[in-house]
Image (cartoon, rainbow, N blue to C red):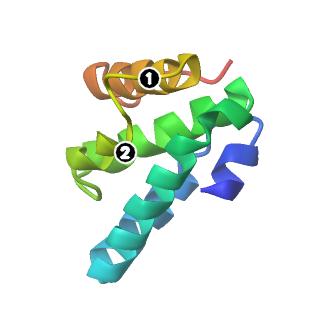
Amino acid sequence: MNCCGQEKYYNRFYALLGQKLCENKRDNKITFQYTLWDHMKNLHRYTLRKINNLARLAAEMVHTFALPIAALRGLDFQNMSEYQIIFLNIVLEELFVPMYAHTPS
């Protein structure tokens, strides 16, 4: 997740790698989910680019069933910060818009 967040543009490689890790061992899925929760708690420290990359990674992992939608429960929906709202908007947009309809800018 850290490497994905540092990329200039979202790179699907990290989602594919995460999917394979989650398929092979349940412990990896749990670790990935806890790591996502840690990142969601610290979104206020991240740049918009990193938030975008992490949100798209989370959306693709949920879209491919590598992670359950419950992975988003790390967000406090009643007291969301501006950064968490941005993150959630990107995740939901990615889930409801065809995943590969985006073209790199």
Q: Quadrant of the C terminus?
A: top right
**Nearer-the-camera pick, 67 or 8:** 67
What is the number of the mark on residue 10? Answer: none
Could one spot residue 9 in this view of the protein? no
Estimate the x, y position of residue 26 in percent, counting from the top left.
27, 79
Rendered residue at 74%/29% (across/down):
47
Identify whether 98 is placed above or below 24.
above
12 lies left or right of 72: right
Amino acid type indicated by mark 1: Met
Q: For the residue labelled by badge 2, is the local secondary structure a helix, a strand or a loop? A: helix
**Nearer-the-camera pick, 73 or 54:** 73
Rendered residue at 37%/19% (across/down):
93
18 lies left or right of 23: right
Estimate the x, y position of residue 32 in percent, counting from the top left.
43, 64
Estimate the x, y position of residue 82 in percent, counting from the top left.
55, 16
Which residue in the protein does label 2 denote? 74
Identify whether 82 is placed above or below 53.
above
100 lies left or right of 69: right
Rendered residue at 42%/18% (across/down):
89
**Nearer-the-camera pick, 99 or 92:** 92
Q: For the residue labelled by badge 1, is the local secondary structure a helix, a strand or a loop? A: loop
Amino acid type indicated by mark 2: Gly
Residue 52 quadrant = top right
Q: Earlier in the sequence, mark 2 or mark 1?
A: 2
Could one spot residue 7 in this view of the protein? yes
Rendered residue at 26%/21% (across/down):
96
Which residue in the protein does label 1 denote? 80
